[in-house]
Image (spheres, rainbow, N blue to C red):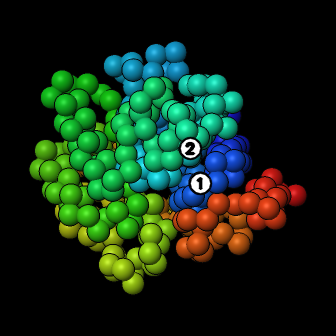
Amino acid sequence: MNSMELAKKIRLDAIEMVHISNSSHIGAVFSVADIVAVLYAKILKYDIDNPESEDRDYFILSKGHAGAAVYSVLANCGFFDKRNLKTHCANGSILSGHISHKNVLGVEISTGSLGHGGNIGCGIALSKKILKQNNRVYVIMGDGECNEGTVWEMALFAQQYRLNNLCVIVDNNNMQGYGYCKEIMNNDSLADRWRAFGWEVKEIDGHNHMELEKSLMLSGKEFPKCVIANTIKGKGVSFMEHNLAWHYRSPQGDNYINALKEIEGK
């Protein structure tokens, strides 16, 4: 399956998941859908028959509230039965709202409390360097998440230990839980900030699959890599784009029907 088809499936699956469960965060899911699709279609090394293979690449979704995107991609890649997606957020389901690794093949770690995925990624990357193994580690975090001090501790650590097997992707959609990032805690010039911490930095259109594929390949240079992926919260559904309400709202009624039509291109 190519990355464009996979991104469309992620959006269709996710909107059905949050519709059925009457849950939230669809805007954040749509923001990262293209990034996740390119990672699984083009970049990551994984084995669905042996998800814990020592040769695998590692992927951590630090902004765990967008977990529906990862559940969808794992199901579409064959890690588990796609029918399980309909249990998302239901009582007793293994597919919790914020992503969980418990009993879910392909999920490395549970996340949701922001600011920690990058630190876990650093630990994995350092261990692989020490063991002289060639695994790569990818972490998606949000631009609002970059308000967390632990993010910058991680940035210092990764540069200090030359973790060139680590790539952080910042989902730079300019919005966070309570408004625009510039209003809550201005983080303009994120690319310059990561460069100041000694990282190799690329700034791209986070919905352009060719740019994503090219930028997510690790270069073999000495330092860790940060890809600033400029995205749109709610990307793919016109009335959700740039609309903070869809951080919280669940698509029901006409909103659900019209969103499906837009994603399917009808």
Q: What element carries label 1?
A: loop
Residue at (45%, 21%) from the top-left corner?
51
Q: Give x and y (percent) for residue 130.
A: 15, 29
Which residue is depicted at the point 21% across and 38% down?
123
Q: On screen, 234 above or below 124?
A: below
User: Counting other residues with Cα less than 10 Å from the Cα at mark 1, is it few (<14), some (14-19), or many (20 or more)?
Assistant: some
Residue type at the position of mark 2: Cys
- Residue 214 visible in rendering: no
Q: Which is nearer the eye, 250 or 6? A: 250
Q: Name the residue under label 1.
A: 23
Extreme residue toward the left, this view: 160
The quadrant of the picture occupied by the N terminus is top right
Q: Which mark is residue 89?
A: 2
Local crowd at mark 2 within 10 Å, few (<14), some, or many (≥20)?
many
Amino acid on which disc 1 is placed: Ser
Q: Residue at x 25, y 37 (%)?
A: 125
Q: Answer yes or no: do the residues labelled 1 and 2 have beta carbons within 8 Å?
A: yes
